[in-house]
Amino acid sequence: MDQGAAPPVFSATAELDGHHLRVVVAGEVDMATADTMFQTALREPAERVTLDLRAVTFFDSAAIHALVQLARRLPGTLTVLPSRQVRRVLDVSGLGEQPWLRPA
């Protein structure tokens, strides 16, 4: 009998609602998955982009780099909703006061 598969280590989904793109990322964002997060956020042209990282459990330097590149590519349009873990990494790296970052 199948006990069910383990939950995915990483996922990134995008939903366009008018001119607002919402990207929901879950699991571990690292060297192997950061580019997928980046590309998913740029997949559809939008006036506003929300990067929902509240289900992210691990966020490394490759993820930070991808996030900073997104902020540069989407000035004034990006909003990031961090998980507690993501918020801690961004605080430690000196990015905790960015205007695109919302409270955890």
Image (cartoon, helix red, strand yellow):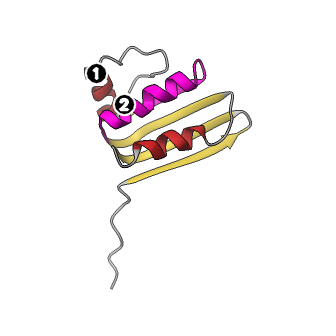
Question: How far is disc 1 from disc 2 in space, using C-alphas?
Answer: 9 Å
Q: Dot 2: few (<14), some (14–19), or many (≥20) neighbours within 10 Å? A: some
For the C terminus, the quadrant is: top left
Image coordinates of residue 10 in percent, x first then y, are 39, 52
In this rendering, the answer to whether 85 lies above or below 78 is below
93 left or right of 53?
left
**Mark 2, residue position:** 64
In which quarter of the view is residue 44 placed? top right
75 left or right of 31?
right
In this rendering, the answer to whether 32 lies above or below 62 is below
Label 1: which secondary element:
loop
Image coordinates of residue 25 in percent, x first then y, are 46, 44
Image coordinates of residue 64 in percent, x first then y, are 36, 30
Q: Amino acid at mark 1?
A: Ser
- The stretch drawn in magenta includes residue 60: yes
Label 2: which secondary element:
helix
Q: Which residue shows up at 45% across the image and 22% down it?
A: 102
Residue range highlighted in magenta: 58-81
Farthest left residue in view: 92
Q: Which residue shows up at 70% across the image and 40% down it?
A: 17
Q: Amino acid at mark 2?
A: Ile
Farthest bottom residue in view: 1
All told, the count of numbered labels is 2
Badge 1 vs badge 2, beta-carbon distance below 8 Å: yes
Q: Which residue shows up at 55% across the image and 32% down it?
A: 50
**Mark 1, residue position:** 93
Q: Dot 1: few (<14), some (14–19), or many (≥20) neighbours within 10 Å? A: few
